[in-house]
Structures are given as structure tokens and as C-alpha cells.
Image: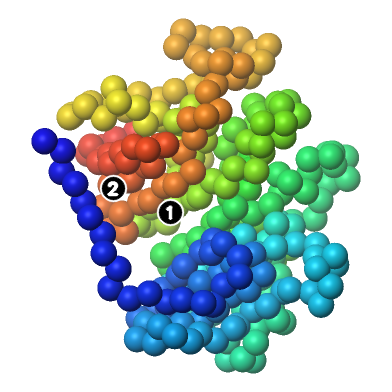
Amino acid sequence: MDLMVEVSPRRVFANAHTYHINSISVNSDYETYMSADDLRINLWHLDITDRSFNIVDIKPVNMEDLTEVITAAEFHPHHCNLFVYSSSKGTLRLCDMREAALCDKHSKLFEEPEDPSTRSFFSEIISSVSDVKFSHSGRYLLTRDYLTAKVWDLNMESKPLETYQVHDYLRSKLCSLYENDCIFDKFECAWNGSDSVIMTGAYNNFFRMFDRNTKRDVTLEASRESSKPRAVLKPRRVCAAGGKRRKDDISVDSLDFTKKILHTAWHPNENIIAIAATNNLYIFQDKLNSEMH
């Protein structure tokens, strides 16, 4: 008999958003939290359900002038006055609530200059930031766009500190990914407890891990076979079109784009990860002296 979990709401915070909410983040003061939609970010008190304070509003007077939307937002893990939000233009804005009640003016703007030689029809779409996460230390930001994951230093706004290619083999497939709407998929990202490894999802129920110290990376698969008790996850490898294939390699042409891992989470203290693959939730625990640690 399957265990059924039923959820019942304890409080409902209503009537503050016109558009779909994309982010919720609890503040380090444990009294307030914020919710963000495409155009606004609201600040709530956990005990007050019928009103909130608008802290960011990027809605233009004329909606025809709209050029970007808010894609994600998060509070700083230690400083309750600081938060960051990302945009569909690939920018990150760090805001300080001590400076003004409405944080329309940012404290810092993180943006990577575009290389004109690589510009294409898809450039703006694939540069949209789908997720942003502060490191546990509060020193770094982790962002995810369509093809890459990036680590930013809060003290360096001009370019990311590190860039990791998640699935660069898809660059030649952007046209078909645009036609089937996959190019608009929003992948999340996560830090491990010590901020030394980052994780994010991909297609074919694959997820990627990058070790920031050793610069090693691994592709793993969340599947029914790998979820059996004591089963060990085997590294997978995707072979680019026309590339040399080894045994067990998967061709980029045979990837299943309907199987995608958009949501991932890492336990704050232990090497336990949660992977959401379609309608399945997988929880994996790292064995001692594993390849990544």
C-alpha cells in the first residue's frame, strides 16, 4: 500500500500578485519573507496574511515598453537587508532595503558583456537567468541560464568568477529546441553544504555536478534502475553530433527532451540530494570517499 501525504494550508497570503509567482524566499530574520512575480517583489510578515509591502516594481506605465521580467529572487543568508533578483536579460541586481522603501535602484548590477562574435537569434533567450542562489557563506551567487551555470563574486560585478558548461552540445540544436519550446525551460541550481560543489539539471533525466576546487564534473542519471536500494549512480556521457562515441555514450540526437530535471535541492549539512524528474522524486545519498568528494 502506497503512503499518501496530504497537505492542508495553515495560512493563506492572498491578493498581492497579478502574475504567476516565480520565487519565495524566507529572510534570515525569520520574521519576513518575499514573493516575486514577473514584474513585482513583495515583502510579507509571516504573521500578517492580508497585506504586504511592494519592494520592487519594474512595471512600465505602458506595457508596450516592457523589455525584461523578473525571473527569480532570494534573500541574503546572513544580512536581512540584502536581496538579489535576476532578469530575463541575464542581469542580477543586488538591492539594500536600508537605502529606500522601494528598491527600484539597485546597489550592484552583475552583468556579463555579450561577445558580438557569438550573437545569434537565440542569444537573448538563452542568456535569461532561470535561477539565482546565494552561497551558504553569502559571498557568492550561483546562476543558471539555458546552457551554463555561473558563479559570481559579490565584489566583482563585471563578469562571473566561474562559468560551467552544462550541456554545450545543445548549441547546434537551438533551432529545434526553439520550435518545441524547450529553449524556454527554467532549470534550477543548488550549492552543496560547503559551497565547493554545484548541481543543476539537464535533459534525459540527467543532472550535472561541478567541483569548484578540482574542476572535475560528472553527469548522472535519475532513473528507476538507479533508485533501487544501494544502487550506485554511474557517470553518463553525451556525445556531440559527429563526435567519437565510446561504449555506453549517448548521442545528442537520442536525448529525450520530455524527460527533464528542472528542480534540484541539496541538504544544507549532509551529502543528500533531491531530484525531481517529471512525476518522480529521487533522493540520493553520497557514499563515503565518493568520486566528487
Q: Position of residue 192 (x, y in %)?
A: 38, 52
Mark 1–mark 2 distance (CA, rounded to whole Å): 11 Å
What amino acid is at disc 2? Asn
Asked whether 278 or 228 is in front, the reply is 278
Q: Secondary structure at mark 1?
A: strand
Q: Position of residue 55 (x, y in %)?
A: 60, 83
Q: Residue furthest left?
A: 1
Q: Residue furthest right?
A: 116
Which quarter of the figure has residue 177? Answer: top right
- Label 2 environment density (alpha carbons within 10 Å; few <14, some 14–19, many ≥20): some
Asked whether 182 or 155 is in front, the reply is 182
Give the colour scheme of this rendering: rainbow
What amino acid is at disc 1? Trp
Q: Above or below — where is 245 with respect to 228? A: above
CB atoms of marks 1 and 2 within 8 Å = no
Asked whether 233 or 44 is in front, the reply is 44
Q: Does residue 204 show up?
A: yes
Which quarter of the figure has residue 184? Answer: top right
Residue 64: numbered disc: none
Q: Above or below — where is 134 with respect to 223? A: below
Q: Does residue 155 show up?
A: no
Query: Which quarter of the rendered picture does the N terminus lie within?
Result: top left
Residue 191: numbered disc: 1
| Residue denoted by label 2 | 271
Q: Above or below — where is 244 with respect to 102? A: above
Q: Position of residue 248 (x, y in %)?
A: 44, 11
Q: Position of residue 253 (x, y in %)?
A: 61, 16
Point 48% across, 30% down: residue:
259
